[in-house]
């Protein structure tokens, strides 16, 4: 066997061995990208570690999970514009609907039926974070529009959390005026509802007169309130308020839970077209399904979200969630598409009240 042939044979063997090693590595490792919204950073950092352990024990495969965070609306736009998300875990159903309705077939239109509880493995609500001792004595939604009160909330045009904030105040006002939120969508009370809607719009216009900073996302507003020390009250996800107390101590802030707020339902789903291209569908689906597991529900509660299966959470974590009257989105509008069109689209109610801001 001549020398040239020996070197050729050896080169073939090396290439074959390298190819097999690469294939073996690919089979043992898979990468996911979770495009999420601002306040979930800490939750998914903990959950990702739990899922990696679970999946490794189940399949022997290592999962590398990358995260992207920002305002929920901006994150949805990033997926539409091409960011290669395997899963999205956003602040409200409309942001996923926006991806599904683009015509790009990124997500199936019936996505919300694929997982339990309308594809929302945890819920939350909107509360008030105030300076320690509550110097402005803020107790309810009416207190936010008193003279001298400065409010921090994100921009409803870019932030899902901000849209929940807005609808919480809107829904509270309707319930106060009507006495029963169920009247809103009952045709028999159309006259009463019209008058109540006018009062609610006036309340929202007054509220945004008191907003001194509109950040693009919920975490940005938390930073403005806590680190920049602007404003008297932050309209916040309950989990953000709980996290602030846990990290900064009870001597820095107080959480005020209004008697009436809104039930927020952050949804999750796979991005069908992307996982088909990347071959990550199986692990992406299991990543989301595992959020409903006892281990994940326990983590969810520990990070200040309300688990949909509270029986799996620690009692001490559940005690952090006070009872209050929770208005549902469907008490106000048929669905998120209708809510978005009426309140937050260009020329919608928010634009109408905010353009008149002095």
Image: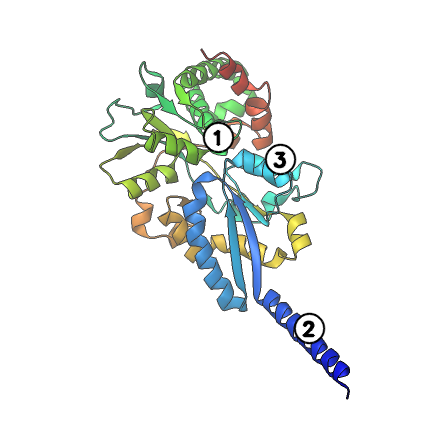
Residue in the foreground of this view, choosing between 275 and 108: 275
| Residue 257 visible in the current orientation | no
**Going 40% across and 44% down the picture, which residue do you hit?**
306
Residue indicated by mark 2: 15
Disc sitting over residue 216 in the figure: 1
> Is label 2 in a helix, a strand or a loop?
helix
Horizontal side, residue 291 vs residue 187: left or right: left
Residue contact between numbered discs 1 and 2, judged by CB atoms under 8 Å: no
Whole-percent x, y for residue 261 in the image: 40, 30
> Is label 1 in a helix, a strand or a loop?
loop
Crowding at dot 2, Cα within 10 Å, few <14 / some 14-19 / many 20+, comes out as: few
Horizontal side, residue 126 vs residue 78: left or right: left
- Quarter containing the N terminus: bottom right
Q: CA distance from mark 1 to mark 2?
A: 51 Å
**Going 31% across and 24% down the picture, which residue do you hit?**
232
**Of callouts 2 and 3, which one flags the residue occurring earlier in the amino acid sequence?**
2
Q: Residue extending furthest front?
A: 3
Disc sitting over residue 98 in the figure: 3
> Is label 3 in a helix, a strand or a loop?
helix
């Amino acid at each position: 066997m001549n020398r040239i042939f020996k070197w050729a044979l050896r080169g073939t063997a090396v290439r074959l061995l390298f190819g097999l090693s690469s294939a073996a590595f690919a089979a043992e490792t898979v990468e996911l990208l979770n495009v999420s919204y601002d306040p979930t950073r800490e939750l998914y950092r903990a959950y990702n570690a739990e899922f990696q352990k679970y999946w490794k024990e189940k399949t022997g495969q290592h999962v590398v999970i990358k995260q992207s965070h920002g305002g929920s609306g901006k994150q949805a736009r990033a997926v539409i514009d091409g960011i290669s998300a395997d899963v999205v875990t956003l602040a409200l159903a409309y942001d996923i609907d926006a991806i599904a309705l683009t015509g790009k077939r990124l997500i199936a239109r019936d996505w919300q039926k694929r997982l339990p509880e309308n594809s929302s493995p945890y819920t939350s609500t909107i509360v008030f974070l105030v300076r320690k001792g509550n110097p402005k004595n803020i107790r309810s939604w009416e207190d936010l529009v008193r003279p001298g009160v400065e409010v921090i909330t994100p921009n409803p045009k870019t932030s899902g959390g901000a849209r929940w904030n807005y609808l919480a105040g809107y829904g509270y006002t309707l319930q106060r005026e009507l006495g029963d939120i169920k009247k809103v969508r009952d045709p028999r009370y159309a006259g009463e509802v019209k008058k109540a809607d006018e009062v609610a719009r006036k309340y929202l216009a007054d509220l945004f007169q008191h907003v001194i900073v509109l950040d693009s996302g919920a975490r940005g507003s938390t930073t403005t309130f806590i680190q920049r020390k602007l404003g008297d009250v932050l309209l916040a996800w309950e989990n953000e308020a709980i996290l602030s107390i846990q990290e900064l101590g009870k001597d820095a802030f107080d959480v005020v839970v209004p008697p009436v707020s809104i039930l927020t339902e952050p949804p999750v789903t796979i991005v069908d077209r992307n996982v088909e291209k990347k071959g990550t569908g199986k692990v992406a689906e299991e990543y989301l399904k595992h959020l409903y597991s006892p281990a994940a529900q326990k983590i969810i509660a520990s990070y200040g979200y309300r688990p949909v299966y509270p029986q799996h959470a620690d009692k001490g974590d559940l005690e952090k969630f006070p009872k209050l009257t929770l208005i549902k989105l469907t008490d106000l509008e048929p669905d998120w598409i209708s809510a978005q069109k009426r309140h937050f689209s260009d020329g919608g109610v928010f634009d109408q009240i905010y353009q008149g801001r002095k």
